[in-house]
Image: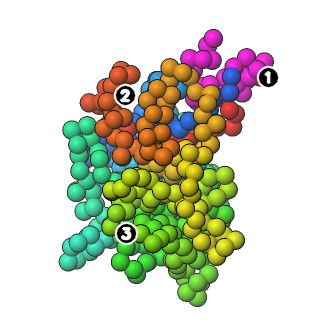
């Protein structure tokens, strides 16, 4: 049947035409698409998306990016790019082609230098593998909702800066809250109307009412006890109404551990013993969590079922684009993806009205 060969976006549009078309096609699991980038040392040249259910690369005709841009995350169906020549962040919807150019940033960082430098200095140390980008992009962007909503808040953490920037689409300038501790935030997430940030085993919250209305970043929870030196990275994800902290370790029998923040017990972090009840996709996009049962509708011959699911099960049902980078590239090559041109960057979860 025609619907069986459609990618995730076209399949959703097919099922939205009428009730008979909807009834004639099965409901697919909402597996995130893999963002594939064509990188060089000057930034991204082009972007494509790999549908792991039908093993096909998707090219959105309305979607173009500026040369010299760096990917800075995906949130609520939108992608964020940092434009090095203009020091601005652009939000783009790859499906519709809509875009919003945000105010110019004045970010300065102290990444080990005696004097602060403009953000473009941060772009130089990015490591490039023979297949492309391996290290983190210069910033991570997360939205409180789709930017078409006038109340949407866009927030940014920078790779080497101890601060959080935020604005709305129509704002003329960014607002900034500095953090005066000796750490750089690793992830951020909007949860129940508040912005949470993480650094290793610590969770912080942006309190807009503190500091006489100027705002302040406050520590609200800490997982432990543990050796902080073993923690490589931390992620935040909302799963079934709960806020989870995911820690990635350098060494040890268990590479990933998950904690749930219990709001009813003074934000206490509780270690989750049964991690098999969740599947989590990690990368430089907002983390995506879903129950394993929701993935059972994937095709038996799909890249997800044959390759990704095995990788996920070996790491406590957590799939990290960076940690599984090499294995992922080799497996994509078997599906006729030219890995000399395209490499996996992160995940993209489209916001589709119909499933």
User: Could you say whether the residue bearing mark 1 is in a helix, strand or loop?
Assistant: helix
Q: Is residue 84 visible?
A: yes
Q: Nearer the observer, disc 3 or disc 1? A: 3
Q: Height in image: 279 above or below 123?
A: above
Residue placed most toward the observer, 236 or 74: 236
The residue drawn where x is 27% and y is 41% is 132
Q: Height in image: 113 above or below 299?
A: below
Residue with the most extreme right position: 19
Residue placed most toward the observer, 81 or 134: 134
Counting other residues with Cα less than 10 Å from the Cα at mark 1, is it few (<14), some (14-19), or many (20 or more)? few
Q: Position of residue 198 (x, y in %)?
A: 47, 66
Q: CA distance from mark 1 to mark 2?
A: 36 Å
User: Could you say whether the residue bearing mark 2 is in a helix, strand or loop?
Assistant: helix
- For residue 351, the mark is none
Apparent side of residue 339 relative to residue 311 in the rendered image (left or right): left
Residue 199, quarter of the rendered image: bottom left
Apparent side of residue 79 relative to residue 40 in the rendered image (left or right): right
Residue position for label 2: 332
Counting other residues with Cα less than 10 Å from the Cα at mark 3, is it few (<14), some (14-19), or many (20 or more)? few
Q: Height in image: 164 above or below 31?
A: below
Apparent side of residue 271 relative to residue 20 in the rendered image (left or right): left
Q: Height in image: 131 above or below 198?
A: above
Residue with the most extreme top position: 1
Does 132 lie within the magenta span? no
Residue position for label 1: 19
Residue 21, quarter of the rendered image: top right
User: Could you say whether the residue bearing mark 3 is in a helix, strand or loop?
Assistant: loop
Residue position for label 3: 227
């Amino acid at each position: 049947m025609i619907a069986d060969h459609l990618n995730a976006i076209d399949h959703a549009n097919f099922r939205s035409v009428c009730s008979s078309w909807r009834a004639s096609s099965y409901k697919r699991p909402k597996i995130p698409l893999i963002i594939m980038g064509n990188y060089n040392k000057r930034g991204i040249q082009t972007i494509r998306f790999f549908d792991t259910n039908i093993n096909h690369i998707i090219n959105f005709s309305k979607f173009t990016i500026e040369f010299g841009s760096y990917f800075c995350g995906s949130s609520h169906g939108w992608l964020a790019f940092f434009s090095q020549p203009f020091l601005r962040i652009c939000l783009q919807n790859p499906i519709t082609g809509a875009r919003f150019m945000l105010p110019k940033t004045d970010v300065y960082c102290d990444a080990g230098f005696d004097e602060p430098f403009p953000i473009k200095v941060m772009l130089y140390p990015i490591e490039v593998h023979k297949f492309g980008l391996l290290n983190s992009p210069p910033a991570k962007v997360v939205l409180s909702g789709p930017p078409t909503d006038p109340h949407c808040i866009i927030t940014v953490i920078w790779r080497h800066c101890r601060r959080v920037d935020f604005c709305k689409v129509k704002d003329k300038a960014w607002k900034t809250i500095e953090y005066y501790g000796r750490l750089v935030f690793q992830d951020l997430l909007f949860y129940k109307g508040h912005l949470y940030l993480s650094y290793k085993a610590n969770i912080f919250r942006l309190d807009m009412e503190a500091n006489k209305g100027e705002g302040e970043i406050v520590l609200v929870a800490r997982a432990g006890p543990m050796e902080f030196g073993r923690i490589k990275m931390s992620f935040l994800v909302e799963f079934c109404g709960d806020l989870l902290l995911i820690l990635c370790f350098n060494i040890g029998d268990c590479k990933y551990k998950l904690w749930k923040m219990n709001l009813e017990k003074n934000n206490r972090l509780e270690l989750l013993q049964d991690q098999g009840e969740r599947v989590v996709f990690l990368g430089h996009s907002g983390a995506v969590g879903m129950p394993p049962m929701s993935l059972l509708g994937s095709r038996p011959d799909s890249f997800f079922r044959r390759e990704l699911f095995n990788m996920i099960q070996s790491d406590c049902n957590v799939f990290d684009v960076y940690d599984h980078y090499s294995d992922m590239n080799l497996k994509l090559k078997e599906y006729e993806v030219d890995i000399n041109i395209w490499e996996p960057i992160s995940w993209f979860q489209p916001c589709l009205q119909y499933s």
